[in-house]
Image (tube, rainbow, N blue to C red):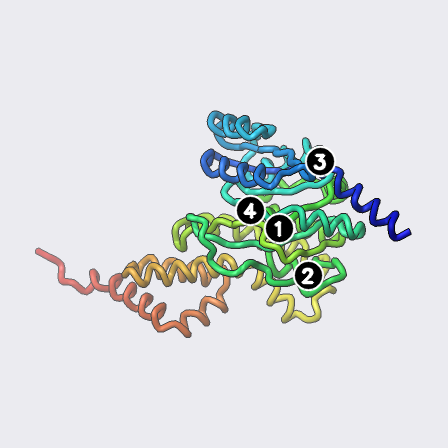
Amino acid sequence: MPGRLAHRLVEQMAIPRRVSVIVPTHDRPLLLAEALASIRAIEGSDLSCEILIGDNGSEGQTRAVADRFGARYFAVNRSGAAAARNAGLRAATGDYIAHLDDDDLWTPSHVRSHLALLEAHPELDAVVGQIVSTDTDRHALGEPWPVDIARTDGDLFMTFMNYFPQVGGTIARASVRESVGEFDESLLGDADWDWHLRIAKRHRVGFVAVPSVLFRQRPAGSADQVPLRRAPYTRRIFFRHALPEWRRWESPREFVRSYGASMAPYYSYFYDAAMTRSRVGDFAGATAAIRHALGLAPFAAARAVIASEELRGSLLSAARAWLRPSREPRKP
């Protein structure tokens, strides 16, 4: 019997697995080409990837990149990554669904570890891996995250309420498309977090401590409007899922902490922006970043200002600069 089981496992591993990889894009052909190359690089006799590109930008160069990498191309008229993802999701024919944003890269160690866990544990319907945050030159900004996930029973809903799984590190069985539906196209930000939460409510999710994605970050303070646009959608998603499941939180304090965790990436962005601007003497810019941080996470931002002499100095310098013109005598 053990010999038959081993033989069956060998046969299963010899059958090529087909993964549908959905890539939303918008006018970034050079970055897109790097992303698609990282997908093709992991293929082998045991694994093939069906690449599906949803494009809600201009068509020209993007279609050419898709053709070069043998990807299926879908022009999408509606704005937002969710609409672009759905175009690929509807057309996917693989046994598994994966994703990659057009400015990120898969690592060579991605996918196979996820598939091995899914094949060994049929009770799981999705697996998340580790993410490596990088700068724009692909240099790592820290250790892979998350380091670990405490739950081993596959119930990761509460885990996902406290951190955003980066969608490029997730692989799900194609069957989740029928059980949880498509991405919510009304969400112009964080629709992938909403999708993860819907999966975690209905299905068991596994975790592999394998760096899977190089997650490209913008320089601190380089794109203030991005987090400001996304934050209302994050707030909406949090309460959409948290309120119906309020019994899962042990106390109101834990609920508040969970909400704070959902807004932490935006606060961190503006905190880093404030520090960066302060160090180059842009005190007005630092003050604007602090103001945004206070609006998104008032308690955390207030604590940061109290604790940081540098931030307090920026606020005072900006205040002096603002008051100085009114104190100067008017010229005749």
Q: Mark 3 and 4 residues: CB-CB less than 8 Å, in contact?
A: no
> How far is the residue under mark 1 from the one under mark 4?
9 Å
Q: Does residue 168 appear in the picture of this structure?
A: yes
- Residue placed most toward the observer, 29 or 158: 29
* Residue in view at x 60 percent, y 62 percent: 147
The numbered mark, 3 or 1, whose residue comes first in the sequence reads 3
Q: Which label sits on residue 193?
A: 1
Q: Residues within 10 Å of mark 3 (few under 14, many from 20)?
A: some
**Residue indicated by mark 4:** 189
User: Is residue 186 among what the camera can see?
Assistant: no
Q: Relative to 190, is 282 on the left or the right? A: left
* Residue type pointed to by label 3: Gly
Q: How far from the left and from the top, in percent, is residue 173?
A: 73, 43
Is residue 109 shown left or right of residue 153?
A: left
At 45% from the left and 63% from the top, the residue drawn is 294
Estimate the spatial distance between the alpha carbons at disc 1 and disc 2, rounded to whole Å: 13 Å
Q: In the figure, 248 relative to 54: above or below?
A: below
- Upstream in the sequence, badge 4 or badge 2? 2
In the displayed structure image, the side of residue 60 where residue 164 appears, left or right: right
**Amino acid marked by disc 2:** Met
* Amino acid type, callout 1: Trp
